[in-house]
Amino acid sequence: MEGSNECASDNRTDSGKKRTFDKKKWREQKYSKHQKIEQWQERRKKAALHKYRKVLRKEMKIADPSFSFNSGSWEDDRNKRKSRYQEALDEYERKKEEKEAQRKEALRLKAERQAAWERAQAERAERYKILNKKTRKGQPVMKGRIELMLQKIQNMQ
């Protein structure tokens, strides 16, 4: 379609099927004086509205410099919503925080395991010392062995 102002995405309906080209409508938009006048009036309205808002902003800044005109009722909903970039940035920050929390949790668990391992090693070393005591003649000292058995029995009860 040469000379057409419509892009390919405009030729598709909501269901995705190709829409037929309306030549009469296209001719009206392209050559109709009435259509051109409407477009001109719309542009003029927008320009006047823009100038009016600009003057209001200047007056508000002079009257109250801390006043923000962004909260005005003339702002449309699109400006109030976050842009796609801002949404993506927020999503990135959220994922980054989640990863950081997971990393901290993993470090904490690793430290706990390390501490438990060190305690167990110390207990084993202590038990080894007690069990490996020997008399002068090389016989095992029974006192330590009996005390360990007593502790086990008391822990079971």
Image (spheres, rainbow, N blue to C red):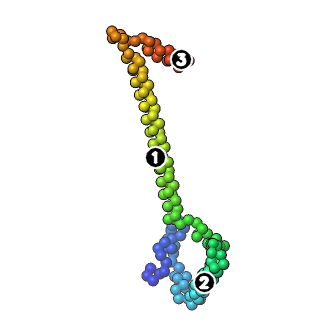
Earlier sequence position, callout 2 versus callout 1 = 2
Query: CA separation, marks 1 and 3?
Result: 41 Å
Dot 2 lies on which element?
helix
Q: Residues within 10 Å of mark 1 (few under 14, many from 20)?
A: few
Q: Residues within 10 Å of mark 3 (few under 14, many from 20)?
A: few
Q: Residue furthest front?
A: 136
The N terminus is located in which quarter?
bottom left
Q: Residue at the spot x=53%, y=66% of the render?
A: 83
Q: Could you say which is closer to the camera, residue 135 or residue 89?
A: 135
Q: Residue at the spot x=44%, y=12% of the render?
A: 143
Question: Which residue is under mark 2?
Answer: 51
Question: Which residue is under mark 3?
Answer: 154
Q: Could you say which is closer to the camera, residue 102 or residue 135?
A: 135
The C terminus is located in which quarter?
top right
Earlier sequence position, callout 1 versus callout 3 = 1
Q: Residues within 10 Å of mark 2 (few under 14, many from 20)?
A: few
Dot 3 lies on which element?
helix
Question: Which residue is under mark 1?
Answer: 103
Q: Residue at the spot x=33%, y=9% of the render?
A: 137
Dot 1 lies on which element?
helix
Q: Amino acid at mark 3?
A: Gln
> Of discs 1 and 3, which sits in the foreground?
3
The dot on residue 13 is none
Instruction: Please state if 138 lies on the left or on the right of 6 as rendered.
Output: left
Query: CA separation, marks 2 and 1?
Result: 53 Å
Image height check: is 103 above or below 133? below
